[in-house]
Structure formats: C-alpha cells, structure tokens
Image (tube, rainbow, N blue to C red):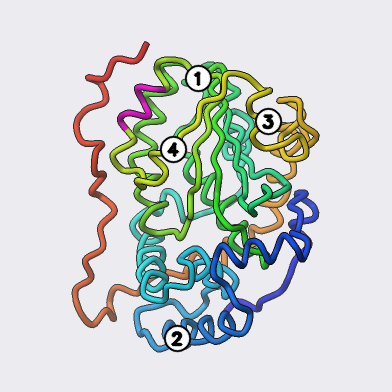
C-alpha cells in the first residue's frame, strides 16, 4: 500500500485545515468518534486486504474518506469502493494517463473548477465552476471530467474531513453550445459521482443563470439525489451569494475575500503537477477482474433520466 504521509499540498493551494471547534462540528455531522473511527477503518482495511480482486496498493487516506462520505456505514463504503476501483478500468479516458499536459492546463484555464480554501460554518466544502472560454469549440469537453476527478481525488487525500460538498456554477458567458456539450459530459460524471464516490452533495447554487440553464437542470434532475433536488438555489447577483456564504469564503471575483479564480486555478495546476507520481502509482489500483469469485453487478452505463438524443433539445 502507498506510504501514508501528510504533504503540504493543502497549504500550497490554500486549503485551510478546520480549527478544533470546526472539526468537532464536522465530526458531529458525520457521526464520527475518534476511537470508533480507528476501529471501523481498520476493519475496512482488513476486509479490503482479504478481497483477492481488490488492489493492494490503494491509498489509505482515500479509503478513509470513503468511510466518512458514507457516514461510517460499512456496507455502503464497501459497495462504493468496489464501484470506485471498477470505474478506473471502465473509464480509462478519465482515470488513465493522469498527467498535467498542456491540453489539461488549457482546459482548466478555459473551465475554472476549483474548491475554495475555507469551509462553511457547518463544515461543507464549496466548489466553484465557471466557463471562461466563450467559444465552445476551443474547449476539450472530454478533458473536463478527467481534470475534475484529478482535483477531487487529491482532495480525498486530505487528512481533515469535510462534512458535505456544495457546488456553485457561475453561468455567465455559458451559451447553448456549451450546454449541449455539458449535458453529454454529465451523462458520465453524475452516475460516477453517485456510484463510485462517497460524495455528500448538500446544495447546488447557480449565479448569472439564464433560461437555458433551467432547462438543463430539468434534464439532469432525475439522476440527482432527492435531497439535492430540493436544494437548488439561484442567486440574482453576487450580493445574494455573499449573503449565503460570507465574504471570507467567496473569491474576490464576487466581492469576497478569497483569492481570484485565476489564482486558485494556478494553485491547483501546481498541486496536480506535484501529485503526478501519486497519480501514476494509483493508476494500477483497480479491481482485478480475472480473480473475481462471482459475477459483479456493477454498471455505469445506465444513465437514468438522460436517455435519448440531446440533439432534440432546444436551448435558448
């Protein structure tokens, strides 16, 4: 297994560790007790090591955060880990050759997607996405899932937990061509997040949204968790966003005090480069299909609620 070391990458990309008071709030939300956590994680590690088809070079810190994301439900954590390690074989275009190439850097500069440095009062992590390139033909939409999961996998190495995840989409400059391509991309990303990751998505926020965005949401809604469907929030302006999250969390672009999105993007490009050896090592951490003892019913190809051709969809 990968040697577990605490790197300084979170300081370099400005990810702040929660104070002790904040950490207790997060642990309370997760139902986490330190002694119980040590026992359950060791049971999970032992179970994984006894599975002949599971990888042996998995990163313990990543597995630990799967347990937290499952709120310490052992069966749920096991199932998601099985899906997770299978997905790495099923989607080589996302999980193989994870290098910070020029094309990947261009994608991150065209589509800003970055976690914000500070957690919310209830311990949730805020992730902002904004398309900066107005010409959709200049964006490699196939690289967006790859870049996103590279960032998210680095976050899973964080020794400090987050209670939940919050996504903020800045829709300024997003046009119909962007939306059509984004919908195709989400056909893969959302099932992966739901089945192969232990993400606890709390809210979806939209700022600078137009009617086309609302149509997209109506299409994606069927595969969202019921709680998330009821937690979609539209902001009329930056003030509404600041009122909800506070100035200390939101980037300067929106009147807050956190770094500019461009700066945060540069931070994460640097941190992804520094994690390239880890990505290379973990690429082989997959389910070994040849030693599976019984048939496994794991499918990522059933994109419930997104069947049919998007060409039939009209977006203003």
Q: Marks 2 and 1, Cα distance to the nearest angstrom? A: 47 Å
295 sits left or right of 177 in the view:
left
Q: Magenta segment range?
A: 214-219
Q: Marks 3 and 4, Cα distance to the nearest angstrom? A: 35 Å
Q: Is residue 6 above or below residue 99?
A: below
SS at circle 4: loop
Within the magenta stretch, is there residue 216?
yes
Decide which of tag 1 and tag 3 comes sooner along the chain. Answer: 1
Q: Marks 1 and 3, Cα distance to the nearest angstrom? A: 18 Å
Within the magenta stretch, is there residue 217?
yes
Decide which of tag 2 and tag 1 comes sooner along the chain. Answer: 2
Decide which of tag 2 and tag 3 comes sooner along the chain. Answer: 2
Percent of width and height locating residue 209: 50, 19
Q: Nearer the viewer, mark 2 or mark 4?
A: 2
Which residue is the site of mark 2?
A: 49
Q: Marks 1 and 4, Cα distance to the nearest angstrom? A: 24 Å
Q: Nearer the viewer, mark 1 or mark 4?
A: 1
Q: Marks 2 and 3, Cα distance to the nearest angstrom? A: 47 Å
Residue visible at 60% across and 66% down in the picture:
28
Instruction: Kindly identify which numbered label has been placed on residue 209.
Output: 1
SS at circle 1: loop
Which residue is the site of mark 4?
A: 142
Which residue is the site of mark 3?
A: 243
């Amino acid at each position: 297994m990968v040697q577990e070391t605490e790197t300084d990458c979170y300081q370099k990309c400005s990810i702040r560790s929660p104070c002790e008071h904040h950490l207790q709030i997060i642990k309370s939300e997760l139902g986490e007790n330190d002694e119980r956590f040590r026992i359950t994680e060791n049971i999970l590690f032992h179970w994984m090591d006894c599975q002949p088809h599971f990888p042996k070079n998995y990163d313990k810190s990543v597995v630990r955060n799967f347990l937290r994301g499952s709120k310490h439900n052992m069966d749920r954590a096991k199932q998601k880990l099985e899906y997770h390690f299978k997905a790495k074989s099923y989607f080589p275009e996302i999980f193989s050759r994870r290098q910070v190439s020029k094309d990947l850097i261009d994608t991150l500069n065209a589509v800003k997607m970055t976690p914000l440095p500070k957690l919310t009062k209830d311990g949730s992590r805020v992730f902002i996405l904004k398309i900066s390139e107005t010409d959709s033909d200049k964006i490699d939409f196939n690289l967006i899932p790859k870049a996103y999961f590279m960032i998210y996998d680095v976050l899973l190495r964080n020794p400090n937990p987050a209670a939940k995840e919050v996504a903020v989409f800045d829709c300024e400059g997003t046009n119909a061509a962007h939306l059509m391509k984004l919908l195709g991309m989400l056909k893969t990303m959302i099932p992966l997040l739901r089945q192969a990751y232990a993400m606890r998505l709390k809210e979806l926020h939209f700022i600078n949204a137009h009617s086309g965005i609302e149509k997209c949401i109506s299409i994606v809604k069927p595969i969202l968790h019921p709680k998330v469907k009821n937690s979609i929030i539209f902001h009329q302006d930056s003030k509404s966003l600041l009122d909800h999250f506070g100035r200390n969390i939101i980037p300067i672009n929106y009147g807050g005090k956190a770094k500019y999105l461009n700066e945060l993007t540069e931070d994460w490009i640097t941190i992804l480069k520094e994690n390239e050896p880890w990505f290379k090592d973990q690429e082989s951490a997959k389910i070994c299909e040849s030693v599976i003892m019984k048939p496994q019913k794991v499918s990522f190809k059933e994109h419930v609620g997104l069947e049919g051709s998007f060409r039939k969809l009209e977006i203003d």
